[in-house]
Amino acid sequence: MKILPVVLAGGTGSRLWPLSRELYPKQLISLTGSGDRSLLQTTLTRVRELPGVLDPILLVGEEHRFLTKKQVEELGLFSSYHLLLEPIGRNTAPAICGAALYASNKFEEDVVLLVLPADHLINKQAAFVEAVEKAKALAEDGGLVTFGIVPDRPETGYGYIARGDGNSVSSFVEKPDFETATKYVLSGTYFWNSGMFAFPLPLLLSELEKYAPQIVSCMKDSVDHGSEDDVFFRFDKDALSRCPSDSIDYALMEKTDQAKVVEADIGWSDIGSWQALWEVAKKDNAGNVTSGDVILEDVENSLIQSGDTLVAAVGLKDTMVVETADAVLVAPISRSQDVKKIVKKLKQQGRGEFQVHKTVYRPWGSYTVLESQERFQIKRITVNPEAKLSLQMHHHRHEHWIVVSGVAKITKGDETFLLHEDESTYICSGTSHRLENPGVIPLELIEVQIGSYLGEDDIVRFDDDYGREG
C-alpha cells in the first residue's frame, strides 16, 4: 500500500494569541525558526521526504482556503493535492471520516492514511521516517495505529496512551495530574498521545461504520452532496452540521480492538502554547527566546517577541511579552495555557483582535488598516500581479483610491480606465466597481473609506474569480 497523507490544517491556536488569530492561525505562521516556512509548510516538506508517498489531502476551514492554497503552491512539491473545505468545524472524527470517504472515491488502490496535524514540530526527521515505516507495516497487517511519543518529562497538558503486549493499546488516558503523570513517565509503558495516526483505508471505514455509524452517515451525505472547484472540495454544510462533533480518539480509538501504538522518539512538540514554543526554541546564554526588534537588560528565561515596534525589557524573569501591531500580551510563561481565557473575553466583548490582524490576507493580495474611526477608515491595499477584486458595491460607504505604485485597472459603473502612480478616483456608495492589477509588479494604493457603516460585510458581490459569496 502507498501512503496518503491527510493533513489536519484547521483550528485557530488560541493559546498562541496575539500572533495566532482566528483568520490567521498558528499553522500558517512561521514560529520555529524554519526560515520563512510556516508550520504547515514544514509539515508538508517533512511528508514529501517519505518513501512511497502520494500527494496529500489537506482539511482546512473555509476561511483559510486561499492562504493554505498559496502556501502549498509556494513549496512547489506537489502536482496533484486536494484541499477539503470544512464550512463548519466538527472535530477530528468527522474530518478524518470525510477525508477517508473522499479518498475512497478518488483512489482505486488501497492506501494507508497517514493522519498528521499541520501545526506540530518534529525535530528528528530520520526517526520520524522510521516510525512511519513501522506504523505502515502495522496498518497493512490490520491495525489502526497511533503514534505514542516517548515522554521526557511529566506533562499534565497531554493525554496518554498505555501500551499493552507488543504494540497493542491497553488504554487511552485523559490529561492526568502531575503526580499521576510522573508515575506514567517512570513506568516506561505510557506515551504522550500525539494525535498522529496510520489507518488502512478499508479497515478505518469498516470500524467507523461499527462504532460511529452516525458520523459515517452524515459524512457520506456531506461528501455525496459536496462541490468541487479546482483543487477545492467543499463538504456539504447542511449534512456536516448534522454530524456529531467527536474526536477520533473518543469516536473510534478508545472503542476498537484493532488499536495499535508505535513508539515514536521523534523530537515532537505540538507547539500548543507560548511555553511549549519557548521550550523547543533556540535560547541565548540567559535562557531567553527573542524575535524581532528586541533589547534586553537583566532578563532571564523569558520569551520576548516584537512584531511591529521595538520591545525593550528590563529585569524580567520567566516572562513572556508578545507584541503585534494591535495587541501586546504580557504574562508569566507558566500561565501560557490561560491565554485562551483572554481570547474568550475578546470574543465575548465583540472585539476584532481575536479574529484578524491589522493586515488581512485575501486571495488577491492583502490590506492593512492604518486608521479606523467611527465614520472613516484608511487602508493600504496590495493587489498581486494579474489579480483582481470582485465586482462589488457598497450600500453605506464611499471610497477614495490613490495609487502609490504600479498600475490599477478600474471598473466604475459603465467606465473602465487605468490609474497610474499619484492618480486617484472616487467611488460613490451604490456604484458597482472593481479593482485590478494588470501589471507584473504588486499594485499598492491607499483607500479612504467614509460612511455611516464601514464593516466588511457591507459588500454586494456581482462577480468574483474566487467563488466568494457576499
Image: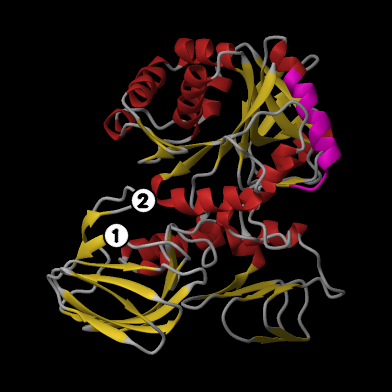
- Can you say which quadrant of the picture contains the N terminus? top right
In this picture, residue 417 sits left or right of residue 214: left
Find residue 466 and name its label: 2
The secondary structure that dominates the magenta segment is: helix
Give me the residue at 18% from left, 68% from top.
394
The quadrant where residue 58 appears: top right
Instruction: Report helix, strand or loop for mark 2.
Output: loop
Q: Amino acid at mark 1?
A: Ser
Residue 168 can be seen, yes or no:
no
Q: Which residue is mark 1?
A: 390
Give me the residue at 54% from left, 44% from top.
9
Give me the residue at 67% from left, 10% from top.
142
Q: Nearer the viewer, residue 225 or 338?
A: 225
Tell me if residue 110 comes above or below residue 388 in the rendering: above
What stretch of residues is rendered in magenta? Answer: 122-136
- State if disc 2 and disc 1 touch (CB < 8 Å): yes
